[in-house]
Image (spheres, rainbow, N blue to C red):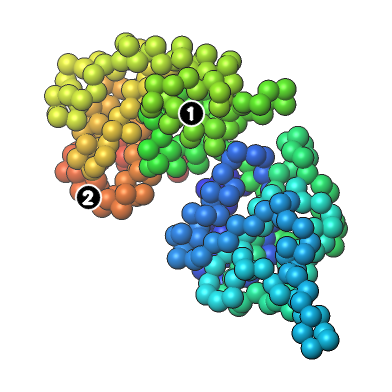
Amino acid sequence: MTPEALATYLESLVENDLKLSTMIWGPPGIGKSSIVAQTAAAKGLDLIDVRLSQLAPTDLRGLPVAEGGVSRWYPPEFLPREGRGIFFLDELNMAPPAMQGMAQQLILDRRVGSYELPDGWFIWAAGNRKEDRASVFDMPAPLANRFLHLDVEPHWESWKAHALNAGVHEQVIAFLAFRPNLLHQIDPHKPAWPSPRAWSTASRLHGAALDIAPVVGAAVAGEFLSYIQLYQSLPDLDPIFEGKGENVAFPAEPSARYAATIGLTVRATDPARGYRGFQWLALKAPAEWIQLYAVDLFKKMRALGRMGEFARFVQEDAQLRQFLADYQKLLAG
């Protein structure tokens, strides 16, 4: 499934109060942990993130303390005692089998030793796959059988929708729109390679005018640098948002067209600016570029909670109403 579909699925588990132990599988760097954290925040849940690979069995079960001639196990302080939340076992299969076995009772029975997980808590876990060259152990069959298994893969459209609302640099988004296969590309022979997580970091480096090669690799960084040179030839987009774009031409070169279209989307910070970008593209650009802008802009306006305001602009524009009607027919066909 896509990261977007994973987020929707996890939110549905919470909304329906389905406390099914859930294992999320996927390659490194695609945002599994971030999606869990975002789900917890969106649903007002606490989040406890535990890395079993960093613990010993007694760290989970607790320490034995003699009381009246009998040993009692005192559970660790990180185990929740009250409230509602997600108990998240990240990188579960990086833990050795003995540690995974210790977690099995918690996952199956919601208890370990004398400790019992409160009713308001979900148990979710995540891990990388062997084919991703991650240093992981096989999950014991009895433990695996306790889980609901969700497989997630990197997906350009899901990441783009996130990036447009997360402050990712527009040049990074435009480059990946032109070269989406570089969103996630594991290189087992080098420490730095592109992934959604790496590109988020690269965006911060690029914003500070620093080389992004240390996070995405030299070859990909070289492609990115060549692409950035296209921005020297891009038209000034600011007059478009002022309703003065009649003399601004839509670029002819495909990579520059991606840059201009993504640039308009990133800078459409409110419905009025989004509408003016739509107007200009409807006058200057071929239909496929208007469609690309429309899809991304609609997602952005919905995320901002301002789709209704934008729709009112469109309703007052006969040309855009006709374009959207034709676009809906195309999708239906």
Instruction: State the image quarter where residue 75 is shown.
Output: bottom right
Distance between the Cα atoms at labels 1 and 2?
Answer: 34 Å
- Marking on residue 309: 2
Q: Is residue 316 left or right of residue 1?
A: left
Which amino acid, mark 2?
Glu
Q: Residue at x 77, y 51 (%)?
A: 95
Q: Earlier in the sequence, mark 1 or mark 2?
A: 1
- Marking on residue 202: 1
Q: Residue at x 74, y 38 (%)?
A: 134
Res. 111 in view: no
Tell how many labels.
2
Which amino acid, mark 1?
Ala
Q: Nearer the viewer, residue 145 or 105?
A: 105
Looking at the picture, how far across and down is residue 49, in whole percent? Answer: 60, 57
- Marking on residue 322: none
Looking at the picture, how far across and down is residue 56, in whole percent? Answer: 77, 58
Discs 1/2, front: 1
Looking at the picture, how far across and down is residue 16, in whole percent? Answer: 55, 71
Q: Residue at x 23, y 27 (%)?
A: 280
